[in-house]
Structures are given as structure tokens and as C-alpha cells.
Image (cartoon, rainbow, N blue to C red):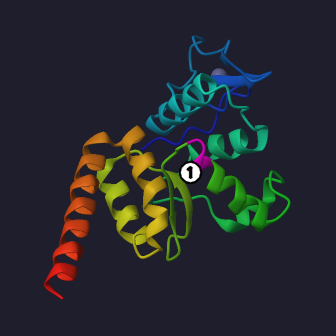
Amino acid sequence: MPINTRRCFECADLGFTIEQNAKRLCWRRNLPGHAEPNAAARIVERAVDRLMVRKLQVDQYAFAIARILTQHTSERPFEKGEILATHLAQSLRSFHHIIADLRKVWLLPVGSRKFKPFGYWIITDQADFAEWVEREKAAPVTQLTWIHAVARHNFPVFAEQLELEFWQDMHGSDSVRRAA
Ligand SMILES: [Zn+2]
């Protein structure tokens, strides 16, 4: 796979920029050699559109991190070392805060992994999303609400499967209670 070493200096291949809380298409987008926005970039664009509809501010740091994440994948996640080198987050704690916002407010499918290859990326396919949900499910039940919201906005077919699972879980625990 050819590696794109010449990213657009204006939009970093996202295809658009944010100026004064408005989305502006990159003026270089139609120039020869400008890369087509990838699947992750399109997911971020839809998330930004949703923020605009809800009349929410697009935080510049969150936007910058989201843009970086579009260049990373499950195989090559954005690593901790690189995160602090960007100077976008003063600490890993503020970085984690931004990631939480991207997931819960932007409803972006930000994948993460605590084993090799460690790091963060924008999830673009359903199988990858399903794997990530399996890992997240180990977390407390309250978290499933936002995971479902992220699924509904990005992987609607998978969201339906999740609903069915939740329903079966609830139903299952009900009958256990009744039987007890
Ligand atoms: Zn551009």
C-alpha cells in the first residue's frame, strides 16, 4: 500500500477545516494530487455535521485529535508517546478527557486497545467495532448507553444486534428473578 507522505497542509486530507465554528471545504480539495478523504475522515465529517445541527461548539483540540485519529487504524493506532509529542493535550489526563468527549458528545467510534498494538483510532468497519464493543462490555453497565448511541450513528445494523442482546439480557435476568 502506498504511504501518502504529502498530506494537504490545509486540511491534513480530511477534506474540510473548521473556522469560527463553521465547516469549510478545503479550497485545495479539487487540486491534482489532493487525497480523497478516507473512510475515517468521512465518519468525522458526519460527526461534525451532527454537532452543527445540535448547535454545539466544535472544540479545536478535540477536532485536532479527531483529525489525527483519522490517519490511524486498528493495525496502526495512535500511541501514547505520539500523543504528548503533538502538544495538543497538556497531559494524558486531558487527552483521555478529549477522547471521552469525542465518544460521548461527538458520538465518534474511537477505538482503543490496552494490549499491543496499543492506542487509539477511528473505527471504520463493523467487525472492528464489534471487537471493540466486546472489550468495552467488561466495563460497568452504565457505559453501554453511549456505546449504543455511537453504534446507532455509525454502525446501525450492529446497533440493532446490540439492542436485541440487551433485550435478551434484561429478559433473561427477569426470568431468573421470577424463578427465584
Ligand atoms: Zn486539503
Q: Quadrant of residue 96?
A: bottom right
Instruction: Give the overall secondary structure of the magenta segment.
Output: helix
Q: Residue at x 63, y 22 (%)?
A: 16
Q: Quadrant of ligand 1?
A: top right
The residue under label 1 is 103
Q: If the image is split into quadrants, where does the N terminus sit?
A: top left
Query: Relative to the observer, which residue lies in front, 144 or 157?
Result: 144
Q: Residue at x 76, y 67 (%)?
A: 93
Compared with 45, 165 (above or below) is below
The x and y percentages for residue 119 are: 57, 65
The x and y percentages for residue 61 are: 77, 44
Region rendered in magenta: 102-106
The x and y percentages for residue 58 are: 71, 33
Q: Residue at x 35, y 56 (%)?
A: 128
Q: Is residue 14 visible?
A: no
Q: Residue at x 80, y 21 (%)?
A: 20
Compared with 86, 26 (above or below) is above
The x and y percentages for residue 17 are: 69, 24
Q: If the image is split into quadrants, where does the C terminus sit?
A: bottom left
Q: Secondary structure at mark 1?
A: helix
Is 47 left, or right, of 180 in this rendering?
A: right
Magenta span includes 92:
no
Q: Is residue 180 visible?
A: yes
Is 90 left, or right, of 104 in this rendering?
A: right
Query: Relative to the observer, which residue lies in front, 165 or 58?
Result: 165
Query: Relative to the observer, which residue lies in front, 92 or 78?
Result: 92
Compared with 115, 43 (above or below) is above
Residue sitting at the far bottom: 180
